Image (tube, grey):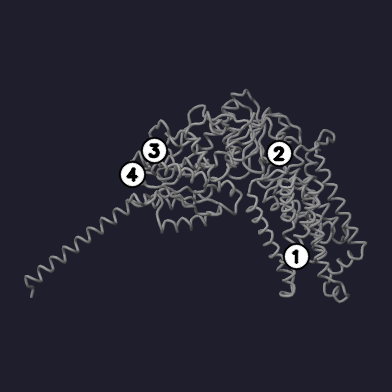
Amino acid sequence: MRTAQSGRRNGVRFTALGAAAILALAACSSSGSSAGSGSASSSSPFLVYVSAGLTGNANSTQSVQSVRGIQAAAAILNAKGGVMGHQVEVKVGNDTGNPSVAVGLLDKQLSSQVPNLVIPGAPPLDVGPALTPILTSHKVLSCTDDPTATQNQPTKFPYAFNIIPSITVEDQALATLIQAKGITKVAVLMGNDAFGQGEQQVITAALKADGITVTGTQTYDDTATNMVPQLTALRAGNPTAVVFDGSGSPIDYILQDFTLMNWNVDKIGGPATLFTDIASQVSAKNYTGMSAEGLAISKYLPPAQQSSALSGLLTQIKKTGPITQPISAYSFFADCVFVTAQAAEQAKSLDSTKVAAALENLGHTASPLYVSMPYEGFSKASHLPTTPAGYFRFVSIGPLVDGMVNGQ
Amino acid sequence: MLQTLLSGLTTGAVYALVGIGYNIVFIGAGIINFSQAQLIMVGSFLAYAVSTKMGTPLWLTTVICAVAVAVLAVLVERVAVRPLWSRTGTRDAELVTTLGVALALDGAVALIWGTDPLQLPYLQNPQRVLIDGAGIYLYQIVLLAFVIVGGLVFTLIFRRSRVGIQCLAASENRTAAMARGINVKLLSSASFAASGLFLGIAAPLYGAQMLVVYNSADPIAILAFVVLAIGGLRSIPGSLVAGLLLGVVQAIASRYTNANISQVVVFGAFVVFLLLMPGGIAGRGGAVRDV
């Protein structure tokens, strides 16, 4: 028989249970909304997780430098109070350039602490596509420098952003630059991998659209050391310029064989060639006369002409060692952090959905921290940056000074 | 066409170099050393290290590389080959262990010097020789000549010298050779050392041609294996001819097709060749006999 006392005890019990349930629901909803936003407490860091092939692949050297760029960005932001009061912390997973390893490491990270920002494939490029679906399901922001822009599908991957323009935009700009030089007959030499094949089609179409005759196209294998056959075939078409793209030793072999064949023609490098420190790998005789398509910061600027953001970034990077790679190896990845931080400040939140929305409507800042290019062009339709007309330019190849090409 | 042929010959010289190295070890030790191409790659990095850090002239760099790569080759034999003889009784495990050495050398070099290509301080402005309008660098001619002369010297050693004939005997039947008092272990070490010396001498020129980069040996290792198959095992002249032929066929295929099709053409041609001459160039009844 229920007594008044037992009734009161039951009432207290039910009230306590109800309060506990309400508290539990509140906790669940707050942790669900902070998925990808890190902890809400200002003592918790703004976590940037980097998946990079630090060892075990051909891009390792570049990967190590990319991480330095990200760490420099973090240090600069922390000196200014962090992001929304949260100090930036950088964690690096060495995926050795292997997408499977990258997935495993990311899974481990997501289990321990969900990052605010993930920078996948810093480099190589095939890691990003493996991680993007996982990041999307966890509502984690990601920023990559994939010129193929395969992840640029805002409807499918609303949290994935690309820090560089697509190769289509770059090659269209390249064709315009070539046309402006008065060159009318061009031969094209690209790698025979998927990226090179795609770029060959894009650049050929862009050149033809600008009224430039493509006298011949050839491909090279990434493992090839002898480019004479391809150059000989292209020479038969009598072009006034040869456009080639790629990075690393194939570019060196191409330049050496131009010299071997004593073929004096305009040598034009695509955007990827500036990821290679050509002047340190081949003698001046081989790269003299070569120009490549680059950004404003690709060409050396003396300190007096540098923006405060650029000089600040360079100073911070140099605190951990010399700058040994082209500036883009550091700057694009640093910009991933800067741009995301700016969007978070604009959204006044670390919530990934709100930050993503802010990125899509990034306001203009008088003195942004990012350095590579203006990033106000993200939109709901495209998570690629837009570039102002005339932003790309030819850079004469020469030695690197602070990562910038100091050519004649 | 002449330019294409010359470029094919210079590339083929590198294939022949490694193919001959494979054969020297096979004749002396009875195994294929999968780390052969990596040895010359390491030699090119040693050339870079001594010439940039110590400022050594090219001749001294060559001597240092020759000795160092020979020592490294003997180390490979002692660490990855010799211990397996008494344990397995067969000669199959050395394929795996020497492959492991190849991978370890690739990784070690990348860890120490990074993955970006490096430039040797000498031969930066090499002298160019014109042959009927086609260019070839003087150092490439030297490399080609070295491979041909080296191949001929080793052929003479294995055919005419006492130690060479002992090697042949050991490679035919190791047990019988041991029963005749031939020190097969010493011959094995000596063959590794000889191949290392041969590759080490060429290492600075290899570095000038192929650039000093950690993964330069990987495609050469595979193609030199094709050289071995075409030229015939235990045939040094066969390796020489096959290496040069491979380089030329590859260059012509690249000239008249594209990078993708040229690979198909090259390997297709050699499959056909092996179907017609299974023993390779040095097969039975072929123009070139063993060694």
Q: Are marks 2 and 1 on the same chain?
A: no
Spatial CA distance of label 2 from label 3 is 44 Å
Number of residues whose C-alpha sits closer than 10 Å to that of mark 1, classed few (under 14), some (14–19) or many (20 or more) = many
Question: Disc 2 marks which amino acid?
Answer: Gln
Image position, residue B269 (x, y; %): 75, 51
Question: Disc 4 marks which amino acid?
Answer: Ser
The answer to whether mark 2 and mark 4 are in CB contact below 8 A is no
Q: Chain of mark 2?
A: A
The answer to whether mark 2 and mark 3 are in CB contact below 8 A is no
The residue mark sitting in front, 4 or 3, is 4
> What residue is rendered at 83% in x and 61% in y?
B234
Spatial CA distance of label 2 from label 1 is 40 Å
The residue mark sitting in front, 2 or 4, is 4
Q: Which residue is mark 1?
A: B77
Q: Earlier in the sequence, mark 2 or mark 4?
A: 2
Q: Which residue is mark 4?
A: A349
Q: Is residue B248 visible?
A: no
